[in-house]
Image (spheres, rainbow, N blue to C red):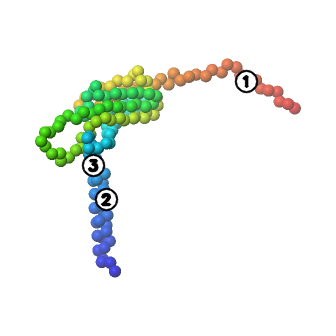
């Protein structure tokens, strides 16, 4: 049959396999010229009673390479992170910094006022503040006259 410690050995293999898969899932694929994948910056979204604040991690992205578009209840963040350094005569051992075009669509829970958009960048973090659209600006429907009850046929 099987040795007594068979279950212990299988349990150890199982734990090691989970650790390896967990470690593998945390790694980034190679990027830049070696990968056709584009990247998405990390974001945090905060909502208050009257506005949204979106923090975008954009280290190494120049403000002129960022485009923000607000439409209804969506914010589209597009841009480009340009390759900063090329090391002449050196062989690459690891590529973890994403370069190139990026795009991130941020759905919000309600429409926002595009004219209220404010953005500031400091220490690699872009902060975008969007005021919620005026709820009172919704179209009002007025009742012109009351509907007359029809006489019932007896």
What residue is rendered at 30% in x and 77% in y?
4
Which comes sooner in the sequence, label 3 or label 2? 2
Provide residue 84's location: percent of width, then percent of height: 20, 34
User: Residue at the left extreme?
Assistant: 89
Of the pair 41 and 153, the residue shown nearer to us = 41
What residue is rendered at 31% in x and 64% in y?
14
Which comes sooner in the sequence, label 1 or label 2? 2
User: For the residues marked 3 and 2, what is the alpha-carbon distance in whole angstroms?
Assistant: 15 Å
| For discs 1 and 2, the disc positioned in front in the rendered view | 2
User: For the residues marked 1 and 2, what is the alpha-carbon distance in whole angstroms?
Assistant: 69 Å
User: Residue 57, can we see it?
Assistant: no
Provide residue 106's location: percent of width, then percent of height: 40, 34
The quarter of the picture where the C terminus appears is top right
User: Residue 69, can we see it?
Assistant: yes
User: For the residues marked 1 and 3, what is the alpha-carbon distance in whole angstroms?
Assistant: 67 Å
Provide residue 76's location: percent of width, then percent of height: 39, 31
Q: Is residue 30 above or below residue 48?
A: below
Q: Which residue is mark 2?
A: 18
| For discs 1 and 3, the disc positioned in front in the rendered view | 3
Q: Is residue 40 above or below residue 134?
A: below
Secondary structure under badge 2?
Answer: helix
In the figure, is residue 104 to the left or right of 88?
right
User: Residue at the right extreme?
Assistant: 154
Q: Which residue is mark 3?
A: 27
Secondary structure under badge 1?
Answer: loop
Is there a contact, CB below 8 Å, between mark 1 and mark 2? no
Q: Which residue is mark 1?
A: 147
Of the pair 33 and 103, the residue shown nearer to us = 33
Secondary structure under badge 3?
Answer: loop
Is there a contact, CB below 8 Å, between mark 3 and mark 2? no
For label 3, the crowd category at 10 Å Cα-Cα, with few meaning under 14, some 14 to 19 and many 20 or more, is few
| For discs 3 and 2, the disc positioned in front in the rendered view | 3
């Amino acid at each position: 049959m099987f040795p007594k410690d068979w279950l212990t050995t299988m349990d150890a293999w199982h734990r090691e396999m989970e650790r390896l898969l967990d470690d593998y899932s945390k790694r980034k694929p190679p990027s830049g010229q070696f990968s056709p994948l584009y990247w998405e910056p990390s974001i945090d979204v905060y909502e208050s009673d009257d506005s949204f604040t979106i923090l975008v991690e954009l280290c190494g992205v120049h403000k002129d390479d960022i485009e923000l578009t607000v439409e209804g209840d969506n914010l589209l963040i597009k841009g480009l992170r340009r390759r900063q350094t090329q090391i002449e005569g050196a062989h690459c051992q690891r590529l973890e910094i994403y370069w190139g075009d990026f795009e991130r669509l941020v759905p919000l829970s309600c429409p926002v006022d595009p004219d209220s958009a404010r953005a500031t960048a400091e220490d690699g973090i872009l902060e975008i503040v969007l005021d919620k659209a005026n709820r009172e600006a919704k179209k009002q429907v007025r009742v012109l006259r009351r509907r007359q009850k029809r006489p019932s046929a007896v």
